[in-house]
Image (cartoon, rainbow, N blue to C red):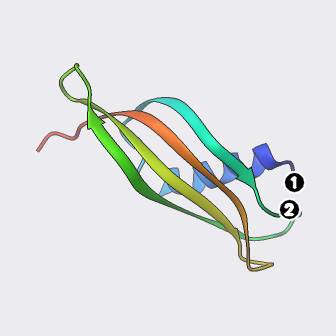
């Protein structure tokens, strides 16, 4: 599969977990590295951890960066890694 398709599937997997529910904008994808190929029929999984966060001048918004990796479970290899930065609405407490 093309690397961009693998990236979009990985983002979709993370979206299903609810961590992107309050996104206003994707501002950057940095250090994108495709480590190994993914073939049709392979099973993948994605993992993201917050690498940085900061407030913005607008109340109720913040900038959050996630370190993301995607693993090909079929071949037991890491297929891609990157850092994604988003503008996110803060949840009301």
Q: Quadrant of residue 79?
A: bottom right
Quarter of the picture containing the N terminus is bottom right
- According to the image, label 1 marks what residue? 1
Mark 1 element type = loop
Mark 2 element type = loop
| Position of 71 relative to 86 (above/below) | below
Which residue sits furthest top? 58
The answer to whether residue 5 is visible is yes
Quarter of the picture containing the C terminus is top left
| Position of 20 relative to 62 (above/below) | below
Q: Residue at x 74, y 80 (%)?
A: 76
Name the mark on residue 37. 2
Q: Quadrant of residue 35?
A: bottom right
- Image x and y of residue 45, in percent: 63, 67
- Image x and y of residue 10, in percent: 64, 54
- Image x and y of residue 34, in percent: 77, 54
Q: Residue at x 86, y 62 (%)?
A: 37
Left or right side of 45 for 15: left
């Amino acid at each position: 599969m093309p690397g961009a398709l693998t990236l979009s599937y990985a983002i979709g997997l993370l979206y299903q977990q609810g961590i992107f529910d309050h996104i206003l904008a994707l501002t950057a994808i940095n250090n994108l590295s495709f480590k190994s190929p993914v073939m049709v029929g392979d099973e993948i999984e994605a993992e993201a951890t917050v690498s940085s966060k900061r407030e913005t001048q607008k109340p109720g918004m913040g900038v959050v960066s996630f370190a993301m990796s995607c693993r090909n479970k079929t071949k037991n290899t890491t297929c891609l890694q990157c850092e994604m930065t988003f503008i996110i609405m803060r949840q009301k407490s």
